[in-house]
Amino acid sequence: MEDAVKSILKSIGEDPGREGLIDTPARVKRAWEYLMQGYKQDPQEILSKAIFTEECNHMVIVRDIEIYSMCEHHMLPFFGKCHIGYIAQNRVYGVSKLARLVDCFARRLQLQERLTQQIAASIMEPIGAEGVGVVIEAQHLCMMMRGVSKQNSKMMTSAMLGSFRDEIATRNEFLRLI
């Protein structure tokens, strides 16, 4: 990876041997290992460690989970918030595990559309949820720094499964609460 960074620096006209760039390849390598740590994580393992039996058959919502990811098309960051809701059926997740799940998928090269769906699908099955809703709103640096250069644009994606898809009242309650 460090050789690739040196090659990139050379190809843009920089000198990888100059003082300010000597350690850059190693720093970039460490940064990318951190940013892409989701590839080394198992989403089901994250969730399975925090499933609790609880007499709870109503909607549970965690909103404003910060996300930081990298667009797979330009390898530039996108960032924003993820909102998750599910209807429990006597089994609930530890709240921090939902945030860890979001990070697990976000810390990969991603499309926001795929990220939203992966989170929803992973939450649904392990507890037999009646339904799941996930909404992500994010800003993409590939739209802000290059191309169309639209600084105030946000992309919103949603994935609705089970009762969140099939029952408009459930979907509307979730959307109103987030």
Image (cartoon, helix red, strand yellow):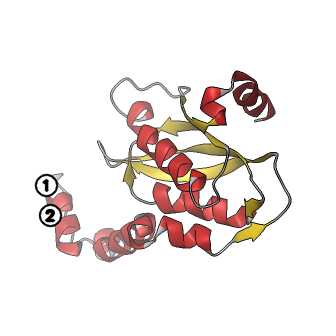
In this picture, residue 115 sits left or right of residue 156: left
Q: How crowded is mark 2: few (under 14 residues within 10 Å), some or many (20 or more)?
A: some
Distance from disc 2 to disc 1, alpha carbons, whole Å, reads 6 Å
Three-letter code for the amino acid on which mark 1 is drawn: Ser
x 55%, y 29%: residue = 154
Q: Quadrant of residue 173?
A: top right
Q: Residues within 10 Å of mark 1 (few under 14, many from 20)?
A: few
The residue identified by callout 2 is 7
In this picture, residue 64 sits left or right of residue 4: right
Q: Do the residues labelled 2 and 1 touch (CB within 8 Å)?
A: yes
Q: Measuring from the top left, give residue 54's x and y in whole percent.
A: 83, 64
Number of numbered tags placed on the structure image: 2
Q: Measuring from the top left, give residue 142's x and y in whole percent.
A: 38, 37
Q: Name the residue nearer the viewer: 93 or 144.
A: 93
Three-letter code for the amino acid on which mark 2 is drawn: Ser
The residue identified by callout 1 is 11
Q: Quadrant of residue 23?
A: bottom left
Q: Measuring from the top left, give residue 83's x and y in whole percent.
A: 67, 43
Q: Secondary structure beneath disc 1?
A: helix
